Image (cartoon, coloured by chain):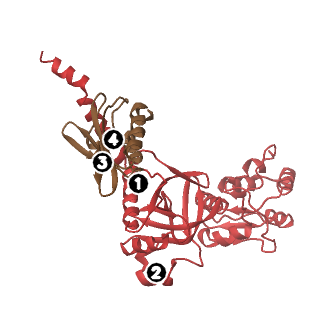
Chain colours: A brown, B red
Amino acid sequence: MEKQIGKAVHEVLEQKFTVNNKLGLHARPAALLVQLTNRFQSDITIQKGKQKVNGKSIMGVMMLAAGVGTTVTIRIVGPDARQAMTEITKLFHGNFQE
Amino acid sequence: MVYPTVEQLYEGMRERLKLSLLNPTVLLTRKVHSGEIHRPGLAFSGFYDYFAYDRVQVLGKTEICFLNKLKGASRRKNLAKFFSFRIPCIIVAKNQPIAKDFVEQATAAHVPVFRAVYRTSICVSQITVFIENIMAPDTTMHGTLLDVYGVGTLLLGKSGIGKSECALELVERGHRLVADDVVKIKREGDVIIGAANEVVQHHMEIRGLGIIDINAIFGVGAIRNRKQITLTVTLDKWSQKKEYDRHGLENQTHDILGVPLPHLTIPVRPGRNIPILVEAAALTQRAKFIGHHSASDFNQRLIDKMKSETPQAKRAVSGLFD
């Protein structure tokens, strides 16, 4: 899916991830995630159930309280969405270096 | 290591212990090599297999009594042996009289003999503290030291990053300045003490204002002479490329004279109110001292919440009602 905002082409990506690291998205993994997302220009949101938070805010990510086995949906809108998604996928699949 | 001379000891302790020099012809140039003192009772009795001669020799009531009993050939022999060592000085405690021949031999051996008014235990502890203080490892650091809510906070960072401006704002907010720009640092045991240089003391240089006297402007309530350093904060120019601590779970440290001290890096950029951040950092540190760790307490609550909500946990709970 692509979205035209002004002149720039903004890609919209969405993917589901299962939290598989030992303790869920607590402070350490959350910090790793926001340190990563803050490197990209794209808008990144994380959703768990009905709750949707800014993927660049550590307090937001921790508020989700996404424990082991929960599924979260990551939605990225922006010029570097593809790259951001690749990196985030790596982080989830690598169980946040735990 | 810096060893104090007997002269320094005399100057420093003269008032405190009410010292008087019994043989003023002797030079006070010998150095004291340890903060510990020695009570030479065994030496007087003729035991010299081990004799800590390079320390201050303190004669209490025991030594003086023994010395008065020591007569004849053994007295001559033992005292001759005693004064053959390079003793820095002798202090007679409790204002006791001392035998004339003892002082004469001391003079001949160039050993100063002092008499102190105070009792032995006070002499011992005061001398030890004084000498240890002079011998303590020290250094100077470029930074600003403040007492923020009772937490000795050392601001570090490159010149021009805004340490002095930050300190000025903190002083305005009621905290106390210890030293700006040059901080004299001493290690006393595992405690790191910071103080101001005597010349600069409580003066600050603020770009655009010049040198200002904190004592004259803000009063004595805004200054402190020395303070134990319990927190170090580095002010660092904000960079997009650098990654900053986001959760505060790790306890970072910064070594000063071999003692690790809690350390934080605060990125500086326009619009960030650094003094407020330093204030909050000091309070967080104080909370840690009394056993409340904001970041890890919060994280533990979060982990507990997630555990209670995992699918497995839910299954276990719902299983109870099946």
The dot on residue B249 is none
Residue position marked by numbered label 3 in the rendering: A59
Q: Where, by quadrant of the figure, is residue B311 drawn?
A: top left
What chain does mark 4 sit on?
Answer: B
Chain bearing tag 2 is: B
| Badge nearest the viewer, 1 or 4 | 4
Q: Toward which corner of the image does residue B310 lie, by quadrant?
A: top left
- Dot 1 alpha-carbon crowd within 10 angstroms: few under 14, some 14 to 19, many 20 or more: many
Q: Relative to the observer, which residue lies in front, B20 or A67?
A: A67
Give the x, y percent position of residue A75. Answer: 29, 42
Question: Mark 3: which secondary structure?
Answer: helix
Q: Which mark is residue B215?
A: 2
1 and 2 marks in contact (CB < 8 Å):
no
Count residues near mark 4 (Cα–Cα under 10 Å), then give few for <14, some for 14-19, many for 20+.
some
- Which residue corresponds to mark 4? B299
| Distance between mark 2 and mark 3 Cα atoms | 42 Å
Q: Relative to residue B304, is residue A82 depicted above or below?
A: below
| Residue A35: percent from left, percent from top | 41, 47
Three-letter code for the amino acid on which mark 3 is drawn: Met
How far apart in space, not on screen, are marks 2 and 4 (Cα)? 43 Å
Which residue corresponds to mark 1?
B285
Mark toward the viewer: 3 or 1: 3
Q: Position of residue B233 (x, y in %)?
A: 48, 59
Task: Give the structural element (helix, strand or loop) at label 4.
Answer: helix
Residue B287 appears left or right of B84: left
State which tag comes first along the sequence, 1 or 2. Answer: 2
Q: Quadrant of the C terminus of chain B?
A: top left
Q: How far apart are labels 3 and 4 at the CA level?
A: 11 Å
- Kind of residue at badge 4: Asn
Q: Is label 2 or label 4 in front?
A: 4
